[in-house]
Image (spheres, helix red, strand yellow):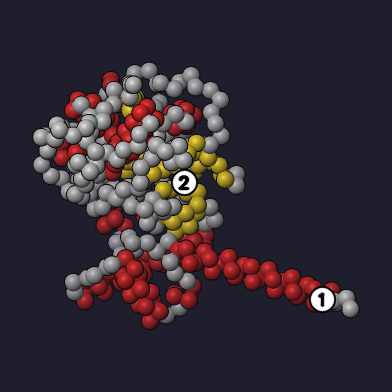
Amino acid sequence: MAMPSSSKIFLIAFSISLLSFSSLARDYSIVGYSPDDLTSMDKLMELFESWMDKHGKIYETIEEKLRKFDVFKDNLNHIDETNKRVSNYWLELNEFADLTHEEFKSMYLGLKQDLAGRQRWSAGNGDFTYRDVVDLPKSVDWRKKGAVTRVKNQGSCGSCWAFSTVAAVEGINQIVTGNLTELSEQELIDCDTTYNNGCNGGLMDYAFSFIVSRGGLHKEEDYPYIMEQGTCEMRKDESEMFTISGYRDVPANNEASLLKALANQPVSVAIEASGRDFQFYSGGVFDGHCGSELDHGVAAVGYGSTKGLDYIIVKNSWGPKWGEKGYIRMKRNTGKPEGLCGINSMASYPIKKM
């Protein structure tokens, strides 16, 4: 017997509702909480305890724990409200959820824009190597080409500038030699002290220039990261050094030029990462609010498009648990010369001769 049309409509509607619920459940499993967690103080405390266990958080006093719980609640409300409002990206309850935004900024950024006035040296103002490049590929991903090492973690040391520099040097070294080798950020933090300031910030161009003058960088395993500034180890001549020949600046506020460079190698870029959504970014194409007061050094390692959104792939240095396994896709073609979060403003890349 044929099913009445009203029954068909009901089943279709029921099926759609199940699909919607399933999709919602998957989304909330990704972001680390569910709507039910926000319904009572007891459930919020249970969520907090579960979050503490997941991330290995231990507080020395009850007073500290209560303060952190208040911060956690405020951050959770921001995350939930943002996830309800935006559609291209989403936020999660990550390991930074017990930090106020001011605490987070003081601990995890580190680009010194007050150095930028003297940043564009003549060494980087030579001919833009890729000025005449045409016919760019629609997408590039240097991770798939074997030119990007694992995502590293700067920790609570403002050394992002060193991680950005090293990522670009690791990339060009692989492109020229065919070998991908992890290089030392700690060597820059300890030894590049003429203009850069270790865990208190620095700039990538100065670091490129230092690598040239020092005669290269050592491997990560020969000069491992300790998350603080130490004494410069000058007696490591017995181990291999990885050199660059120089560096070039990408013309400022010119996205077409940035893409030309990025089609040929990973590029060091500076962004404003102090927006609260950056702290809790989990996935998607980020197009949230941010300015162009550059405060964080990262590495652009590709570009592409999805669902009508063009983006740049950015490797961060906050560990693989942040964002998309340590990466963020940042929207491009925003109509602003400086790009989203100022990403087009201050890009540079190392040069390596055979």
Picture quarter containing residue 207?
top left
Marking on residue 124: none
* Residue 145 pos. (x, y %): 45, 37
* Residue 310 pos. (x, y %): 54, 41
Q: Residue at x 44, y 52 (%)?
A: 324
Left or right side of 200 for 351:
right
The answer to whether residue 235 is visible is yes
Instruction: Kindly identify the amino acid type of the residue bearing the numbered disc 2.
Output: Arg
The answer to whether residue 116 is visible is no
Left or right side of 54 for 309:
right
**Front-most of residues 236 and 28:** 236
The residue carrying mark 1 is: 6
Q: Residue at x 30, y 61 (%)?
A: 100
Q: Residue at x 85, y 76 (%)?
A: 3
Q: In what quadrant of the picture does the C terminus appear?
A: top left
**Marks 2,1: beta carbons within 8 A:** no
Left or right side of 222 for 148:
right
The residue carrying mark 2 is: 329
Instruction: Kindly identify the amino acid type of the residue bearing the numbered disc 1.
Output: Ser
User: Is residue 221 positioned above or below 243 on the image?
Assistant: below
Q: Which secondary structure, mark 1?
A: helix
